[in-house]
C-alpha cells in the first residue's frame, strides 16, 4: 500500500483503526492525548500525535516501524507534542557522538522514503525548530506538506530557521473551492482535506479507498470459459471488472466495481460543516465529543446546567457535544460514528468498570438521539476493523 | 522555601529525590525518559523533563502544582520533550476559545510568580517556539534563565520569534572561572552550575543547603538562663548559633552551624570533571551509567567486548559506564552515588523481577569497584530521602 511500486497489491487486505489516545487536553490514568493509527494493509498512518504516543504504540499491536505518514489536524499541543519524540525513536534520532567521532546517521538514509507529515501552517516550523534546538540527528529523511488556508501565506516555511538536515522540501497546498482535494493519492487510496471550525486553524481528513472489485459469482463465467476453451486466467481480468470477448463472440463483463471504504477523521471542532460534502457517506466518522450534559450520571454536573448551556460552553471552547457529533454523522449519512477526545472526567476504562460504563453509555445515548447508525465511544487501544459497506 | 517572604521556615523540613524517569534515549515498559523531582520542603524542583514526565508525576506522590523550578541539563529531546506538555498542564495551557469569546487566561496570572526554568542556550528558544507554534496560552508566567558557555552569544534569545505572551525576560548567565556560581540563591539553598562533557553543551547542578543549626544540648544552657532569670526564648537565638551575654556577664554561645545537605545532579556525560570542585563532598551524586559490560549477565554482550571496548564505545557517544560514575563519586568524595539514565536493555523492575535484580546488582557492583560509598541504581518512581551527613 502507498508504495510507488506498480507491483503492490491491487486491493487493501485490511483496514483497521486503533485508538492510541482518546483524551482531550489533559491525560488521565485511562486516556492519553489524541492519536490514532490507521492501518492500511501493512502500512500505518498516524492521525495526530499527542504526548506519549510512542508509549501507547509500545502498548498496542501497531508497529512503530511501519509508520509511513502522520496527519496533524491542528497544532495544539495535545495533538502534536508526541511527534518529535516519536520521530526521534522511529528514525533513530536520539543521542549523538562526541567531537571527532563520526555519526553514521549523517551519511545514512538519503535513499530512504521520507516520513511524510501533513498538517496546517506551523506544522513544519514546529518540527524544524523542535528538532534543531534539541540537536536531534535523524537516520532517515522527513517531509512536511502543509495545507494552507486562504489567509495563510501561500509560500515560505513560517520560520527563520533553515531546514533541518533531514528535512526534504515539502509542498504548500492551496485550497480549491474551500477544500484541499486529493492531497495524496496512490493506486489504492486518496486523501482529501477540509477545514473544520475550532479555536485555531484545524482540518479533517477523508481517506477514501478507490473502487474495489465487485462480488463475482464464478458460476456465471466458468461455463462460458470452458465451452470456448478460454484459459481460466481470464477470471482475474473479469474480477477487475474488465470486459472480455471470447472466441465464439460471447462478451463477458466482470462485475462492476463497488465504492471503497471511506473514513473521515476530524480534529477538534465546534462545527465541521465545511467538510460535509467530502465526508458524505463515510463508512466511519471519527468525531470529537469533549463535553456532555449528564445529569444523574456525572456527579460534577453543575446545578444550573442544561443541554443548551453545556453545548454553548462546549462550543465557546471550540468543541462538540455527543449530540452535535451525532447530528453531523446523520447529516453526512455516515454508517458508523466513533466518538473520541473526551474530557478527562469521562473515564476510559468502561470495558472493566461499571461506573465508567454507565457514563460512556450515557454519552453514546446522547449521540444516538441524533444519529440512527452505530455509535461507539472510543477508548485507548480500542481496535476497529473497517469493512466495506454492504452492497 | 524559595519564597521571597521573610517569614519562611529557617530550615528545610525535608529533602527528597523522586526519580520520574531513569531511561536513556528510548523509553521501555519499566523506565521512562529522564526526569527527577527534588522536593525541598513543600516545593518541587524538576531536573530534566523527558516525554511523559507529567504521566510519571501522576503516578508519583509528587504534586505537579508544587513545581516552582525546572532545571534542564541539556536540550536533547529525551531530557526536554516533556517540558511543553508539562507547562501546558501545570499552567492551564491547553485549548483556547473561539473568536469573540474572551480567554480569561489572557488577563490572569500577571501577579503570579513565574515558573523558573534554567538550562543551556536553546532552552528559551525551544520553549518559545514550541509554545508559539502550538498556539499555547498559559494562565501564569514563566521565565527562562540560560547559562551561557564562553562560545555562546552573551546576549539575545537564539531565535527570531518574539517572546511568548507569558514569557518574562530571563537572564543570560555568563561563566565565572569556568562555572556558573550561585545562579540561584534564597535564604535556605544555593544552586551552582558547571559544564560537564557530552556530545552537546551539557551541565550539572549542585544544590547546596545553607549551613544548618548545630546539635544543641539544652542542659548546657538552661541552668545559666534559670540562674540569671533570662527568658527561655533566648534558646532560639542560641539554636541559630548566636552568642548571648547574660545579666551576670556570662557569655553563652550556641552550637556552631553544620554544613547543609549537598546534592549534585548531572546530565549526560562522558567526563564531568569540570564540576568536580563544586560537587566536592556531595551527600548525593546523581550520575548517569548508560552502558555497562556485563558478561554472563547481559545475554546481548557482544563476543569481542571487554570493559575497555564498552567504555570506549560508551564515551564515544558521550556517556559513562558504572565504573566511570564510581570513579567520579570517589574523586569528589561523595557520600552516596545514585545511578540513572540506563540503556533500555537494563530493566527497571528490579524490585519485583529476579532477572532484573541480577542485572542491576551487577551494574551496582561495577560502580562499587571504584567507589567505597553507597551505590544505588535508580528506578522509576524510586524515592530517596536526603539526610544530613553525620557530624
Image (tube, coloured by chain):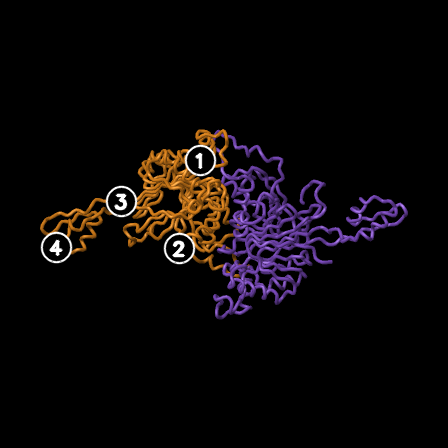
Chain colours: A orange, B purple
Alpha carbon distance from label 1 to label 3: 38 Å
* Residue pointed to by mark 4: A226
Point out the residue furthest to the right here.
B248
Q: Which residue is mark 3?
A: A211
Per the image, label 2 sits on a secondary structure element best described as loop
Cα distance between the residues tagged 2 and 1: 46 Å
- Mark 1 — residue? A292
In this view, the mark in front (1 or 3): 1
Mark 4 or 1: in front is 1
Disc 1: host chain: A
Task: Say which residue label 2 marks.
Answer: A112
Q: Badge 1: few (under 14), some or many (20 or more) residues near its Cα, within 10 Å?
A: many
> How many discs appear?
4
Q: What whole-number distance in Å separates the C-alpha atoms at marks 4 and 1? A: 63 Å
Where disc 3 sits, the SS reads loop
Residues at marks 3 and 4 on the same chain: yes
Where residue A325 appears, x then y in whole percent?
A: 39, 36
Across and down, in percent, residue B15 comes to 65, 51
**Image point 47% across, 57% down: which residue?**
A106
Which of the marked residues, 3 or 4, is nearer the chain's N terminus? 3
Q: Tell me whether marks 2 and 1 sit on the same chain.
A: yes
| Chain where mark 4 sits | A
- The CA distance from mark 2 to mark 3 is 30 Å
Task: Select label 3 or label 4 by which is in front.
Answer: 4
Amino acid at each position: 500500500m502507498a508504495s510507488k511500486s506498480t507491483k503492490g497489491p491491487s486491493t487493501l487486505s485490511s483496514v483497521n483503526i486503533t485508538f492510541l489516545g482518546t483524551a482531550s487536553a489533559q491525560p488521565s490514568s485511562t486516556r492519553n492525548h489524541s492519536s490514532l493509527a490507521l492501518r492500511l494493509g501493512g502500512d500505518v498512518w498516524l492521525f495526530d500525535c499527542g504526548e506519549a504516543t510512542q508509549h501507547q504504540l509500545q502498548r498496542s499491536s501497531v508497529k512503530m516501524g511501519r509508520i509511513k505518514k502522520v496527519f496533524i489536524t491542528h497544532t495544539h499541543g495535545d495533538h502534536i507534542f508526541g511527534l518529535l519524540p516519536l520521530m526521534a525513536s522511529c528514525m533513530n534520532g536520539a543521542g549523538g557522538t562526541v567531537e571527532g567521532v563520526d555519526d553514521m546517521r549523517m551519511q545514512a538514509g538519503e535513499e530512504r522514503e521520507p516520513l511524510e507529515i501533513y498538517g496546517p501552517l506551523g506544522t513544519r516550523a514546529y518540527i524544524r525548530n523542535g528538532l534543531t534546538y534539541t540537536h536531534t540527528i535523524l537516520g532517515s529523511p522527513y517531509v512536511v506538506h502543509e495545507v494552507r488556508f486562504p489567509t495563510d501565506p501561500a509560500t515560505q516555511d513560517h520560520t527563520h530557521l533553515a531546514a533541518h538536515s533531514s528535512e526534504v522540501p515539502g509542498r504548500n497546498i492551496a485550497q480549491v473551492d474551500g477544500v484541499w482535494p486529493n492531497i495524496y493519492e496512490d493506486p489504492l487510496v486518496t486523501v482529501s482535506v477540509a477545514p473544520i471550525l475550532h479555536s485555531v486553524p484545524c482540518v479533517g481528513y477523508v481517506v477514501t479507498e478507490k473502487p474495489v472489485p465487485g462480488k463475482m459469482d464464478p458460476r456465471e463465467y466458468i461455463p462460458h470459459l470452458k465451452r470456448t476453451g478460454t484459459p481460466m486466467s481470464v477470471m482475474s481480468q473479469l474480477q477487475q471488472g474488465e470486459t472480455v470477448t471470447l472466441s465464439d463472440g460471447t462478451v463477458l463483463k466482470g462485475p462492476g466495481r463497488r465504492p471503497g471504504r471511506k473514513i473521515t477523521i476530524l480534529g477538534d471542532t465546534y462545527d465541521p460543516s465545511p467538510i460535509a460534502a467530502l465526508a458524505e457517506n463515510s463508512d466511519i466518522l471519527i468525531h470529537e465529543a469533549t463535553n456532555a450534559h449528564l445529569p444523574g450520571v456525572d456527579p460534577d454536573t453543575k446545578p444550573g446546567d442544561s443541554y443548551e448551556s453545556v453545548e454553548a460552553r462546549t462550543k465557546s471552547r471550540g468543541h462538540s457535544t455527543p449530540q452535535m457529533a451525532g447530528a453531523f454523522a446523520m447529516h453526512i449519512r455516515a454508517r458508523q460514528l466513533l466518538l473520541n477526545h473526551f474530557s478527562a472526567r469521562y473515564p476510559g476504562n468502561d470495558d472493566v468498570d461499571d461506573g465508567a460504563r454507565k457514563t460512556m453509555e450515557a454519552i453514546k445515548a446522547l449521540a444516538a438521539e441524533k444519529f440512527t447508525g452505530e455509535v461507539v465511544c472510543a477508548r485507548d487501544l480500542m481496535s476497529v476493523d473497517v469493512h466495506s459497506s454492504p452492497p
